[in-house]
Image (cartoon, rainbow, N blue to C red):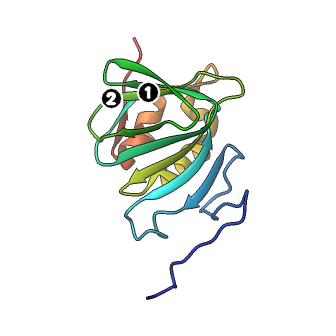
Amino acid sequence: MSDDRFILLEPGAARPGRIPLPPAFAVKATTDDAEGRFSLLEVILAQDIPRHVHHLADEGIYVLDGILEIEFDDRRHRAPKGTFALLPHGVPHALRRASDPPPRVLQISSPGGWERYVEDLIEAGPAVLTEGRLDPARINPIAAGHHISYQEQG
C-alpha cells in the first residue's frame, strides 16, 4: 500500500493553495490530493450563498457548528450542528446563515475543484460584490469556468 498521498493535518491546519485564503476557508484536501475525485474545505459561512446550480459536481455539507439554512430546489431546510446534506448536481440551491455566530461546515465537492473556485473568487475581490453581497451577475463569468451558474435575483 502506497503512502505517498497520505495527509495528516494538525488541528487548525490547512493545505496550501495557489493563493492565501481568508480565515473563513481552510482547505483540508485539495483536488490534486484526491487525484481529482473530491476536494474538502472547512468553511465559516460569512456570507449567504445565492441560489446556484453545480452542473458537474455533487456537493456534500456537514454542519460542524451553528445552524445553516439550505434552500434546495424550492424547499427550505434548517440544518443544525450534526446535519448532513447531499446537494446533487443539476438542482438549484442556496446556503444561508441561520445562527450567530455563522455556521461552520465541512464542504465536499465531487469531483473536486471547489478550492480552485474559491481561490478565483478571492482573487476577484470586491468585483464580485454589489453593496457588500455576492452578486450573481458578477460571479457568473468566474463560476462558468467551474461548471456553476448563479441565478439572477429579481
Query: Foreground residue, 82 or 29?
Result: 82
Which residue is tagged 1?
94
On the image, which quarter does residue 149 sit in?
A: top left
Q: Residue furthest top?
A: 154
Report helix, strand or loop for mark 2: loop
Report helix, strand or loop for mark 1: strand
Which residue is tagged 2?
92
**Amino acid found under the numbered disc labelled 1:** Ala
Query: Foreground residue, 148 or 71?
Result: 71
Is residue 51 left or right of 55 when viewed as pictured?
right
Is residue 66 left or right of 114 when viewed as pictured?
right
- Where in the figure is residue 109, as x and y percent of width and height? 42, 51
- The N terminus lies in quadrant: bottom left
Q: Is residue 39 visible?
A: yes
Q: Are marks 1 and 2 in contact (CB under 8 Å)?
A: yes
Q: Residue at x 54, y 77 (%)?
A: 6
Name above or below for residue 135 compared with residue 108. Answer: above
Gap between marks 1 and 2, in whole Å?
Answer: 7 Å
Q: Which mark is residue 49?
A: none
Name above or below for residue 122 compared with residue 78. Answer: below
- Where in the figure is residue 64, as x and y percent of width and height? 61, 41
Is residue 10 left or right of 113 when viewed as pictured?
right
Q: Residue at x 59, y 59 (%)?
A: 28
On the image, which quarter does residue 98 sit in?
A: top right
Q: Residue at x 62, y 32 (%)?
A: 103
**Amino acid found under the numbered disc labelled 2:** Pro
Q: Is residue 50 visible?
A: no
